[in-house]
Image (cartoon, coloured by chain):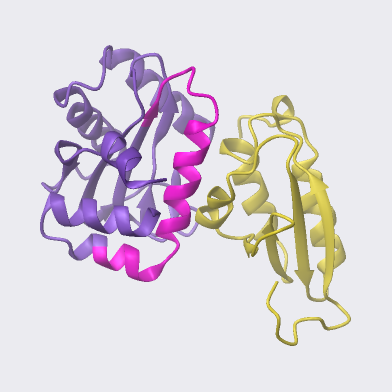
Chain colours: A purple, B yellow
Amino acid sequence: MDESTIDQVLTEDLIVLAEPPANKPDAIEYMLDIAVEAGRVTDRATALEAVLEREKQSTTGVGKGIGIPHAKTDAVREPTVVFTRSTEGIDFDSMDDQPAKLLFLLLVPAEGGEEHLSILSSLSRALMHDEVREDLLAADSSAAVRDIIVDALT
Amino acid sequence: MNESHDTTPQMIQRTVTVVPEEGLHARPASAFVEAANEYEADLQVGPPDADPVDARSMLGVTSLGAKGGDELVLYADGADAEAALDALEDVLSTPEAEFDDE
């Protein structure tokens, strides 16, 4: 992904460093509300249903302290990524049993085709690097998080 | 693949086409990682033209972004390598609809 794409997908108001609720369903709603407040979501209930439906298939706790709940849904007009992080970590039913500390909510229009897969895989590839995860855990501002993600993805 | 001395006699590889139409995601991906975790062999998976990732890592498998119809190369090194490749191939060859809810 290039920098201008990332800046459309992950604006600074979608990066919130305040502590999310400590359980998975509430944390997902918390992240969805961030997207709603940023004006990204046309129908909150539909978006939530899509994310929970995907979560029901298999957890999006991908291990190494990361959760990436995601869905394709008509409730967004453009691809949207919300970032937040949990100090204590949240039980995300990850296969490696590590609590999720870095959380990304990914919402992509239903007609988005392969964009969904491409954002998800790019993000996962970036997060495989230990230093990217460490830097994201240590970042002290939304701008810093944004810069780390841009560096890691470009 | 690592260039080092990994090519021991046990090291085997197999190229498999991803059958689930949504690709290696959600249920198929978790079934794949769960299957990989049942074997002792060192297991990796990747596109034919790029470095593979740990087949036991959900993050790694998600990073592949493998779509239905894509080819993936499975690598296995260890005593139960053959059985492990059979199991992983089985997951990749199962249509999406046949993955159960549990």
The span shown in magenta is A107-135
Using the image, determine if residue B26 lies above or below residue B14.
above
Marker count (numbered): 0
Asked if residue A144 lies left or right of residue B96, the reply is left
State whether residue A148 appears in this view.
yes
Give the quarter of the image for residue A43: top left
Q: Where is residue B35 in the image (x, y as percent from the top left)?
A: 69, 53
Depth check: A15 or A50 in front? A15
Asked if residue B81 lies left or right of residue A41, the reply is right
Give the quarter of the image for residue A70: top left
Q: In which quarter of the image is the C terminus of chain A?
A: bottom left
Specify the principal SS of the magenta part: helix
Using the image, determine if residue A133 lies above or below residue A46.
below
Q: Where is residue A15 in the image (x, y as percent from the top left)?
A: 19, 43
Depth check: A127 or B35 in front? A127
Give the quarter of the image for residue A50: top left
Name the residue rendered at 39%, 37% in the picture. Answer: A69
Q: Position of residue A150 (x, y in %)?
A: 30, 53
Q: Does the magenta stretch include residue A112?
A: yes
State whether residue A101 appears in this view.
no
Q: Position of residue A37 (x, y in %)?
A: 14, 24
Using the image, determine if residue B29 lies above or below residue A89.
above
Q: Quadrant of the N terminus of chain A?
A: top left
Using the image, determine if residue A23 lies above or below residue B53.
above
Name the residue rendered at 46%, 42% in the picture. Answer: A120
